[in-house]
Amino acid sequence: MSGNLSPFHFAIVGGGTAGWMAALLFAHKWLKPASEQTRPVKITLIEAPDIGIIGVGEGSTPSLKRFFQQLGIADSEWMPACQATYKTNIRFVNWSPAAAAMGLGSDYSHPFISQPDLHSETAFYSNCFKRRLGLAVETAPEKFLLNGYLAAQQLAPLTPANFPFRIEYGYHFDSGLLGQFLKQKALAMGVQYQALTVTAVNQLPDGRIASLSGEIADGDSKAVQTLDADFFIDCTGFRASLLQQTLQVPFESFASNLFNDAAVVLPTEAFAIPPVETKATALSNGWAWQIPLRHRSGNGYVYSSAFLSKDAAELELRQHLGLLDSEVNARHLQMKVGQVTRSWEKNCLALGLSQGFIEPLEATALHLVQSSIEQFIDAFADFSDEGQAEFNRQVHQRFEAVRDYIVAHYKLSSRSDSHYWRANSSNMQLSESLRQILDVWFRQGDLAQELSRQEQGRQQSGSHFGATSWHCLLAGYGVFPPLRQPQPANVSDAFTELELAAFFNGCSLNFQPQHLLWRD
Ligand SMILES: Cc1cc2nc3c(=O)[nH]c(=O)nc-3n(C[C@H](O)[C@H](O)[C@H](O)COP(=O)(O)OP(=O)(O)OC[C@H]3O[C@@H](n4cnc5c(N)ncnc54)[C@H](O)[C@@H]3O)c2cc1C
């Protein structure tokens, strides 16, 4: 961005979480004092007052912690404003009857990985390897990872200053309040705001977007307004008005192996002592989330409309929550699951639901929004056609890698109590990368090595779901052969030999329940 001195203008269309996250990270990077930049930058966020935000999306991964840290916003500032709670873990309930039948329990955990787990991850892998050979050793993920202990004891992941390890955690939050909070912050940083329903996207002869036209309320009438910009960020949600509707970038559906395309949402009362985990319970045709906030709990049933009607889904969720007699209204949503072939086309970048969505299991959407914004900032600052193509390739592959992990939950589930679960487990529409991961597991190969081989192939490090996450899923599901009979004598069990329970229970003494930390 060098040359003339007129500001380079980014127009962000959409004021959901994706739009405001982009506004803040752009402002942090580019709204600098004039002396610090070669060309001034202007950022305008445009939002249709008559089109609401999706209003779900209330669980995060640990990347949101990094989002607030880089903006210098403390947990103590934003969390009370957004009724937020800490999240150390996702607990999966009733996903694998096979695990329960093997005595491994009907629940398992997928904890976020913290620094003390460096001490135990190898032990976890080693025990899983022995169990794949038919040896009777401990393999429950939550027993090998500190955040599993914090979740079981309902402890907040905040350490005293003298605790020498870094703890990773995510959050649960009210998405409407988060949007309002981010908006205030962005306005304070100099982002301009325009309430405007975009009705036309005006293009230059070469296809680039030149301006947006829309209607703005003016007393009882409506005035038409046009807004020029140099670069446009499409955060219009599932509508995808700019990238898909105007620039016609194709959308790749994931329906061949992710069947869920609908959700029904119902709030319940807040917990007296809020858990520090999201609960994901498998139901007849999908799964239900439970997200504990300070002022309420968020609940929703994510299901496939090809297998279950809207009314039956609502009834099942009400039964699951014990809300059959409640008059609380449910909200029904459609989901478009898949991704665009290119997130960045000409002078337009799509972020959030307009870019793609891999259903909410594992709560990865905002993580993908954030990583796309951060990567775009790097690529844009040093713009080249090759850089743009590389950005698109990496974002596309990141979605594919996350998709593999989510698909595995359905493919490997041993539930067979409905057409839906049977269709999932018999579905052979799997990516080559997922087939290889499963093949290595079943052949008693080295899973960490296979994942690292795949990352190298993608020329991308730091895939969101690493070896420990995959071990949590596969061990939690009990994807193991029957135990050898008889068991060999003196099988070493790394869990007991390293006295991990004593280590983690000792660590846990440093933590407190989160409600004791709240001032209000
Ligand atoms: C059932 C479900 C559960 C989910 N759970 C999670 C979760 O646990 N964790 C997670 O990370 N994510 C989750 N997500 C995804 C998450 O909700 C979204 O990624 C996130 O809210 C960002 O949405 P968005 O900003 O892209 O779109 P939206 O919130 O839909 O915002 C769209 C914006 O575009 C504006 N707009 C649209 N058209 C126009 C126009 N013509 N002119 C001007 N403005 C316009 C609207 O006014 C609105 O401000 C979930 C999604 C679903 C469907």
Image (cartoon, grey):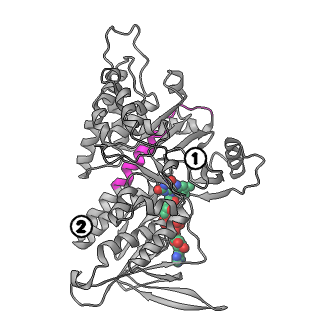
| Residue nearest the observer in this picture, 50 or 183 | 183
The mark total stands at 2
Residue shown at 30%/24% (left/top)?
Answer: 498
Q: Is residue 64 left or right of residue 107?
A: left
In the figure, 370 relative to 148: above or below?
below
Q: Mark 1 — residue? A: 290
Q: Is residue 301 left or right of residue 90?
A: right
Q: Position of residue 196 (x, y in %)?
A: 53, 83
What secondary structure do most residues of the magenta stretch adopt? helix
- The residue lying furthest to the right in this view is 325
Q: CA distance from mark 2 to mark 1?
A: 40 Å
Q: Secondary structure at mark 2?
A: helix
Q: Mark 2 — residue? A: 387
In the figure, 490 relative to 42: above or below?
above
Q: Position of residue 138 (x, y in %)?
A: 39, 23
Provide the residue span drawn in magenta.
397-417
Q: Position of residue 415 (x, y in %)?
A: 56, 32
The mark that comes first in sequence, 2 or 1, is 1
In the figure, 192 relative to 434: above or below?
below
Amino acid carrying label 1: it is: Gln
In the figure, 69 relative to 285: above or below?
below
Amino acid carrying label 2: it is: Gly
Q: Is residue 223 left or right of residue 465?
A: right
